[in-house]
Amino acid sequence: MLVLFETPAGFALFKVLDEGKLDKVEDLWKDFQSSESARRVVELKAFNKFENTSDALSAATLIIDSKPSKGLRKFLQKHCEGETLAVADSKLGNAIKEKLKIDCLHNSAVMELMRGLRNQLTELISGLGSQDLGPMSLGLSHSLSRYKLKFSPEKVDTMIIQAIGLLDDLDKELNTYAMRVREWYGWHFPELTKIVSDNIQYAKVVKMMGNRVNAVDLDFSEILSDDEVEAQLKEAAVISMGTEVSDIDLLNIRELCDQVLALSEYRGQLYDYLKSRMNTIAPNLTALVGELVGARLIAHGGSLINLAKQPGSTIQILGAEKALFRALKTKHSTPKYGLIYHASLIGKASQKNKGKISRSLAAKTALAIRYDALGDGEDNSIGLESRLKIETRLQVLEGKDLEKSAGSTKGKPKIEMYEKDRKKGAGALTTSAKTYNPAADLVLPTEETPKKSELASKKRKHQEAETEPVEEAIQEDGGDQEYRKKKKKKKSKETEEEPAVDADGDKKKKKKKSKESEDPAVDTAEGEKKKKKKKGSEDVAMQTEESGKKDKKKKKKHAEE
């Protein structure tokens, strides 16, 4: 029986000389107390040495995964024909048995034998000293640790932190230099600032043109894509109000334009480099929020691992710490977003839904960062899937807002689909057309004025018609005492009627509003009194006329006599 033993230097095959001792597992350790007794139990048959550290690392990683390496398979085929192989891992033994057709053994006696071999390893293998075995095992353990942590030089996020910092600095410097070019050349050709708005195009035009007098003879089609802009430029150069500048001034301006163009070109190269590094180190984060926002999050967090330790609520307000602590101090509402605000998904949302989308995006971003930092996969499937879910949620939120704005305040509008009421293959509607229902109309009741009051008002004289509005105004206003006193002084004859009106006014003061049914009754009572008064005055007039006629007849009789 042979024993397979793995060492940092290579694979060793030991032949068991006395297999009977394996039956006594409890006493097996006594045979490995010294090197001489160990040599009576086992002896080295073959040794397969690793060529370099990478070979040792690949073989060790395959052994950890219970898979034999290519070198190990060749080594076993050469030395294990017709022998039983004792292994420390049962899964490795099954793999060797399937691929090499070698019988493998794994039990407690084999594990005790392995423990004894490890104790006397340097004595059993000639040429392998303890001073060599220590550094080998240490180097292999470090390599295995890096492999387990998926450590790779391509996963170093320090380059991203430096690149995004340099990109921000370049943007500031480029903007400063471009503004300086505009201000400096504006003394010579001020109209060009409004004609060409892009800073890079402005610098190219200034570098190509130099003095504005040369603009008429030059072709700006390579720089300016629009022919109308080029025509405006040439026209403005002829009638420009700028001052004249010397050749040495134009030389310095052109050198500054060269600096702007060089910075712009380097900025583009740096952005491409940052984009490629972000797709390599954090592909899911890049797919979800973009290269620039993802790089700023990593730079603000310190590293990708540190950022993976943060919850979604922290990632949501990362970059807005000053506003957060100010809000906590003043007891105001905390900010809803920080650096993540510049993501394209939040830009698509309306102002009302930005907070909800930022919260959802921060939660998905936390998952994507953890997968990028600690996961095995290198694809961006999780980021793309999360982005699709957030876009769907955004569409749902925007749709709800549209429905609420279209409907009533009590709830969602009931929208009837036009095609739903149609028969399949027919042009007519399945339901009958709705007709107007007049019974559903609501009409306010109108007050009917009594006929007696109308007749009484028609028969009143001019004087009574003048006094009636005054009395009605007094009744409606709740009785105006000052006005009534003036009327009492003017008209002494109506003293009997005035107290009744005052009493009605006092009642209205107490009740604030009298019933509408009592008003017609009061009007009719007053009308009857006035009728009686009219009849009395008419009787007096008739009596005076009759007495006058009798006197005339008597005078005529006396005259005739």
Image (tube, rainbow, N blue to C red):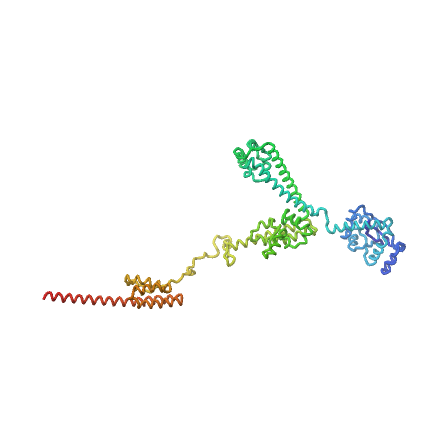
Give the residue at x 18% y 67%.
547
Quadrant showing the C terminus: bottom left
Pick whichever, 463 or 442, lies toward us.
463
- Determine if residue 300 is in view: yes
Coordinates of residue 525 in the picture (x, y in percent): 32, 68
Pick whichever, 10 or 334, lies toward us.
334
Residue 211, by quadrant, is: top right
Residue 237, by quadrant, is: top right
Coordinates of residue 395 in the picture (x, y in percent): 57, 52
Residue 259 shown left or right of residue 460 in the figure: right
Task: Tell me if residue 375 comes above or below residue 560 in the rendering.
Answer: above
Residue 458, by quadrant, is: bottom left
Residue 74 shown left or right of residue 319 in the figure: right
- Determine if residue 455 is in view: no
Residue 442 shown left or right of residue 321 in the figure: left
Pick whichever, 412 or 105, lies toward us.
412
Coordinates of residue 335 in the picture (x, y in percent): 60, 54
Quadrant showing the N terminus: bottom right
Tally the numbered discs: 0
Pick whichever, 477 or 296, lies toward us.
477
Query: Residue extending furthest left?
Result: 561
Coordinates of residue 477 in the picture (x, y in percent): 37, 63
Residue 555 shown left or right of residue 331 in the figure: left
